[in-house]
Image (cartoon, helix red, strand yellow):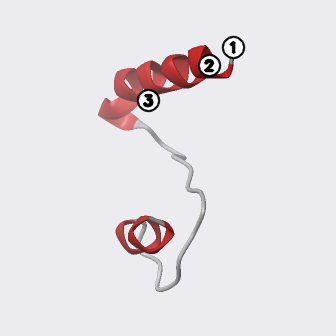
Amino acid sequence: SKQELGRVSGLEVSTASACVVTPGKAREIIEEIAEKLKSLKK
């Protein structure tokens, strides 16, 4: 939910989106998610 995304992003308000600025060790996971999202758009 927007409320949960805001909370886990460290915000005190709801949010519809978030971004990763420095992926660090999560780079592979983020790339995998991006590829899956691209395939859903087709």
Whichever of labels 1 and 3 marks the residue nearer the N terminus, that label is 3
Above-or-below relation of 39 to 23: above
Which three-letter amino acid code belongs to the residue tagged 2? Lys
Q: Nearer the viewer, residue 1 or 19?
A: 1
Q: How busy is the neighbourhood of tag 1: few (under 14 within 10 Å), some, or many (20 plus)? A: few
Per the image, the residue denoted by label 3 is 30
Q: Is the residue under label 2 in contact with that under label 1 (CB below 8 Å)? A: yes
Q: Is the residue under label 3 in contact with that under label 2 (CB below 8 Å)? A: no
Q: Is residue 23 left or right of residue 14?
A: left
Which marked residue is nearer to the observer: mark 1 or mark 3? 1
User: SS at mark 1?
Assistant: loop
- In percent of width and height, residue 39 lies at 58, 14
**Residue drawn at point x = 57 percent, y = 69 percent:** 15
- In percent of width and height, residue 7 lies at 38, 74
- In percent of width and height, residue 6 lies at 47, 71
Q: Which mark is residue 42?
A: 1
Above-or-below relation of 15 to 26: below
Q: What's the CA distance linking mark 1 and mark 3?
A: 19 Å
Q: What's the CA distance linking mark 1 and mark 2?
A: 7 Å
**Residue drawn at point x = 60 percent, y = 62 percent:** 16
User: SS at mark 3?
Assistant: helix
Which three-letter amino acid code belongs to the residue tagged 3? Ile
Which three-letter amino acid code belongs to the residue tagged 1? Lys
Q: Residue 41: which quarter of the image?
A: top right
Q: How busy is the neighbourhood of tag 3: few (under 14 within 10 Å), some, or many (20 plus)? A: few
Q: What's the CA distance linking mark 2 and mark 3?
A: 12 Å
